[in-house]
């Protein structure tokens, strides 16, 4: 999943080399402008990114893997220029098998494996797909922490259905001994109100 042979990733391989890069953590990036640029771009962290907004609204200093897990990939919410950009990336995790042949860097996201492990109710957003893979990569490569940036779950409406999936994965990471960090304003560590 995580390519540890180069930094940034140029070719996707599963094997570790003797001169491999071992990140201090994995940063999972959403696209919310309030915190996305707080990610540890200048530190030896692996960076997982997603979203047309991270292409159209800003230029990320770097990233190691891109995730475009929407089905279908080609949709009115994703511009032609964004789809053309995806064609240039060396590593793009996708679920849309029909579209993958159009993207040279596309790799099939291991959806069944991760849903079998984390459950079918957890995958409520692109960030959830990214976080699940980050957890597995932390375990596989003995990486101690995950940082969540550009992810705002403060809105009671827009992200209400996404937040429980992310919080479940944060809990899964913690139970596995993986430290999860996020800016306070993300509100990811606040439990839901018990107003029933």
Image (tube, rainbow, N blue to C red):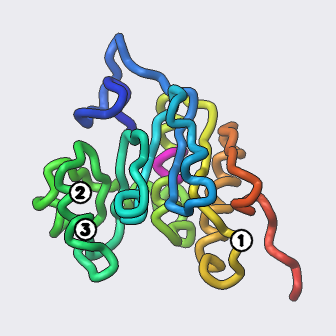
In this picture, residue 41 sits left or right of residue 53: right
Label ID, residue 86: 2
Region of the chain picked out in magenta, as a range = 131-135
Q: Is residue 130 magenta?
A: no
**In the figure, 168 relative to 28: above or below?**
below
Residue that extends furthest to the left in the rendered view of this protein:
101
Residue that extends furthest to the right in the rendered view of this protein:
195
Real-space CA distance between mark 2 and mark 1, rounded to the nearest whole angstrom: 30 Å
Q: Are marks 2 and 3 in contact (CB under 8 Å)?
A: no
Residue under the image location 74 percent in, 62 percent down: 187
Residue to which mark 3 is pinned: 96
- Dot 2: within a 10 Å radius of its alpha carbon, few (fewer than 14), some, or many (20 or more) residues? many
Residue under the image location 37 percent in, 56 percent down: 67
Q: Quadrant of residue 12?
A: top left
Residue to which mark 1 is pinned: 154
- Which is more foreground, mark 3 or mark 1? 1
Real-space CA distance between mark 2 and mark 3, rounded to the nearest whole angstrom: 13 Å
Residue under the image location 40 percent in, 39 percent down: 62
Quadrant in the picture for the C terminus: bottom right
- Residue 36, image x and y in percent? 55, 53
Helix, strand or loop status at disc 1: loop
């Amino acid at each position: 999943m995580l390519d540890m042979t180069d930094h940034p990733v140029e070719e996707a391989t599963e094997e570790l080399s003797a001169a491999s890069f071992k990140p201090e953590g994995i940063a999972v990036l959403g696209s919310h402008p309030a915190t996305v640029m707080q990610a540890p771009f200048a530190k030896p962290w692996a960076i997982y990114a997603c979203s047309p907004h991270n292409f159209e609204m800003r230029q990320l200093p770097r990233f190691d893997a891109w995730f475009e897990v929407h089905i279908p990939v080609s949709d009115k919410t994703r511009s032609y220029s964004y789809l053309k950009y995806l064609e240039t990336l060396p590593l793009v995790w996708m679920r849309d098998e029909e579209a993958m042949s159009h993207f040279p860097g596309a790799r099939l996201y291991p959806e069944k494996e991760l849903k079998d492990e984390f459950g079918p109710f957890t995958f409520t957003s692109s960030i959830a797909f990214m976080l699940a893979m980050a957890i597995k990569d932390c375990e596989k490569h003995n990486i101690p922490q995950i940082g969540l940036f550009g992810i705002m779950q403060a809105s009671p409406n827009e992200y209400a259905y996404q937040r429980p999936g992310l919080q479940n994965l944060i809990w899964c990471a913690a139970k596995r001994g993986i430290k999860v960090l996020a800016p306070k304003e993300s509100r990811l560590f606040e439990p839901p109100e018990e107003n029933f």
